[in-house]
Image (spheres, rainbow, N blue to C red):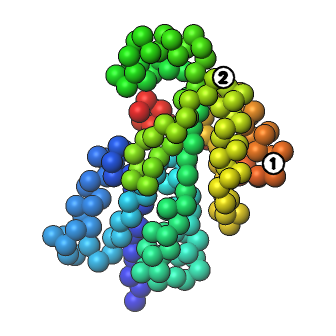
Amino acid sequence: NSTTFSYSVKPSSTPFADCCSSISLISSASYSAISSRVNTVDSKSTTYGVKILVDYVLTLEKEGKTVEEIVEKVEKIKRRITIYAGLDTLEYLSRGGRLSKAAELIGSMVNIKPIITLDEEGKIQVPTKCLGVVKAIRYIVDKVMKDEIDTNHAFYTVYTSGTSNTEKLEKKLEKEGIAVAGRAQVGPTIGSH
């Protein structure tokens, strides 16, 4: 007699997870008929950070790990997933109210490219602002090289509209010996955030 377990690796609880509150509700004790079969892990990540975790869950499940072992391992690895993004335009920060029109104008004139990442709580942070795409790509490559890359897990690049900057990033990463497993387009929900 086999029991089916469901795993839910949800996007970060802070800026992205309003849509995932139903998963947490279903997995709560009030739904005891299924709560023992649903395991929810807050990824503190988004996009391909979540994909890495889901792929890891599937690998662990194939290896025959118990539910408890899977949840424990996913909780450990989620802290090691880092997302860096270079913003090519300030337009959408301004449209979304995160940047004033004056700051957008001045930043665009001097070609500022903010780099964003997610902190340990899944909140968007801006660790630096670079002058131009070349310096933004160099910053991201330097950060990736400084971090310890776990070659047991895939390394992905993502883009929003055009792929030219992503292709430049991938070439620089490959020169540094980092294999890129794949490239994917960020969906409109995250892209508009």
Looking at the image, tell me whether mark 1 or mark 2 is earlier in sequence order.
2
Residue shown at 15%/70% (left/top)? 30
Q: In this view, does 158 lie above or below 93?
A: below
Asked if residue 7 can be seen in this view, the reply is yes
Label 1 sits on a secondary structure element that is: loop
Q: Where is residue 160 in the image (x, y as percent from the top left)?
A: 56, 31
Q: Is mark 2 on a helix, strand or loop?
A: loop
Image x and y of residue 162, in percent? 64, 26
Quarter of the rendering occupied by the N terminus = bottom left
Question: In the drawing, does residue 31 fall left or right of residue 177?
Answer: left
Q: Is residue 64 above or below residue 95?
A: below
- Would you name the residue on which mark 1 appears? 176
In the rendered image, which residue does mark 2 sit on? Answer: 132
Q: How crowded is mark 2: few (under 14 residues within 10 Å), some or many (20 or more)?
A: some
Between 95 and 116, the one lying in front of the other is 116
Q: What x and y, as percent, mark residue 191?
A: 48, 32
Q: Which amino acid does label 2 sit on?
A: Gly
